[in-house]
Image (cartoon, grey):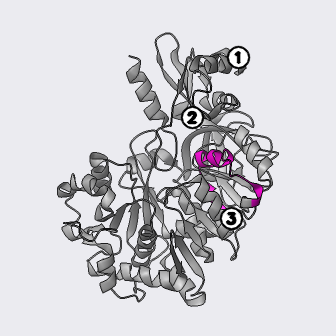
Amino acid sequence: MGNLLARHAVYKPNKLAVVFEDKRLTFDEFNKSVNRLANALLDMGVKKGDKISTLLPNCLEILEIYWAAAKIGAVSVPLSTLLLGKGLKSLLDDSDSVALFTNHSFVTTVDEIRLELKKIKSERFIITDSSDTIGYTDYHVIKAKASNRNPNIINSGNDPYNIIYSSGTTGEPKGIVLTHYIRCLYGSFFSSTFRMTPESVIMHTGAIIFNGAFVTFMPSMYLGVPFILHKQFSVDEFIASVEKEKVTHVIMVPAQLIAIMNSPKFSFKALESIEMICSVGAPLHKEYKDELNKRLPGRFYELYGLTEGFLTILDKYDADRKSGSVGIPMPLYDMRICDDNGKDLPVGEVGEIVGRGPTLMTEYYKRPDLTEKAIKDGWLFTGDMGYVDKEGFLFLVDRKKDMIITGGVNVYPKDIEEVIVQHPDVMEVAVFGVQNEKWGEIPIAAITLKKPDSISSDALKQWINEHVGAKFQRVHDVLIMKEFPRNVAGKILKRVLRDDYSASHK
């Protein structure tokens, strides 16, 4: 991966490479800046194969860290900015990190644990935005002292490029190891799938540390096109940037798409340059897919996938006729639907989604036991439930662990959610199950509203239970919330909702 930036610096030195806030760097400028960081790391004793972690929000520096690591064969480990002391220490230790990049916002968090981190030398706590912070090495000072020449490190496709920790939405985070080869395939496969060209302009407004960001980040460098990164998501800034920069490709989580569609500034004219708007990270309910296809026709894609390496794509030309689906596997990927014994199920029957393909992870870092459970005979068992229609299109039902068993009947939260989002007052919904002595489990619906106090929980519960398709899908309670607990990728944390509800209703 490290060769790509150097290549573009030679063949298109003056082309715009990255944009962050008021900074606009050409490929030549960006390459030289990355080289300085790469050489500074080598001067500090960081070697090929060493793990370097980031605890940073979206910033220009994190882009430089990713590419500097690629050039010297170090392994970048982006960590969630939502981590607290013990959780942060656990992942830094688990990943064997020898350096940590952070900024002033997280100094207090890091200081709580830094003396316990035996593998990170004191000079390798590096701060990106504050030169007078005691005990931290200044990012820009070490860069200024280093050479801007390309470091002469040879990397192979099998070398690890980064370790992405799973979100932990269904358990303890696991370190997913992805190689240079896999990330190169992200560049070539996704640029082809999403019809990107050397004239494309790519923008990202979500967290750059979650794996979905690499779906457009890698193609931007593969093709050598501008990559515009926002500090954080803002509906107004998103719409303004698309219009100003003539953005062609964006990838977003459902919450961002819903916010854009509900914005008074949403207009076809402002967003007409977009050629791809891809939903990723969690299912976008059919109600919203249909609305987006109506208001921005011929642009919507959906990606269902796991960081571990299997995915399907709903292409923009199938988005209307298969709006309930998450598409089909890309070329060179295979998919099966299996029962609990691993046997294939026929068309239309719900089972576990099992897949394989060339971007399959190397392993869960240092966890051969978990790797063996997830990958059997080269097939990744996803833990997600779904079925295929007679044309082979995948329809996602739910996560296996989110399924609710009430009175002995399997209830899939997504089926109930698809009904609830049709209510005109509902913005977002998450349905989850809690323990119940009589029924085993019962469904609970958590809701956010488009306008505060537009409907009561009792009235909404009555409406839901009148509109669901079966008695066992009726919800036992409705929680109206100001906002959902989310991970850094924007996924709603049903586990937190479930635990909080259970604790408050003992």
Question: Residue under circle 2?
Answer: 341
Residue at 39%, 67% in the rendered image: 75
Residue at 72%, 38% in the rendered image: 287
Above or below residue 19? Residue 172 is: above
Instruction: Report how far apart the C-alphas of labels 2 and 1 lie in the structure.
Output: 37 Å
> What kind of element bears circle 1?
helix
Where is residue 47 drawn, in percent x and y?
Answer: 31, 75
Q: Earlier in the sequence, mark 2 or mark 1?
A: 2
Above or below residue 148? Residue 390 is: above
Where residue 93 sits, quadrant-wise, is bottom left
Alpha-carbon neighbours of circle 2 within 10 Å: few (<14), some, or many (≥20)? few
Above or below residue 422? Residue 344 is: below
Where residue 188 sits, quadrant-wise, is bottom right
Asked if residue 305 lies in the magenta stretch, the reply is no
**Farthest residue toward the left?**
115
Instruction: Report how far apart the C-alphas of labels 3 and 1 lie in the structure.
Output: 43 Å
Q: Of discs 3 and 1, which sits in the foreground?
A: 3
> What kind of element bears circle 2?
loop
Contact (Cβ within 8 Å) of mark 3 with mark 1 = no
Question: Residue under circle 3?
Answer: 243
Q: Is residue 409 something that shows in the picture?
A: yes
Alpha-carbon neighbours of circle 1 within 10 Å: few (<14), some, or many (≥20)? few
Q: Earlier in the sequence, mark 3 or mark 1?
A: 3
Task: Determine whether, in the image, residue 370 is placed left or right of residue 238.
Answer: left
Front-lying residue, 79 or 236: 236
Asked if residue 263 lies in the magenta stretch, the reply is yes
Question: Residue under circle 1?
Answer: 466
Quadrant for the C terminus in the image: top left
Alpha-carbon neighbours of circle 3 within 10 Å: few (<14), some, or many (≥20)? some
Instruction: Report how far apart the C-alphas of labels 2 and 3 lie in the structure.
Output: 52 Å
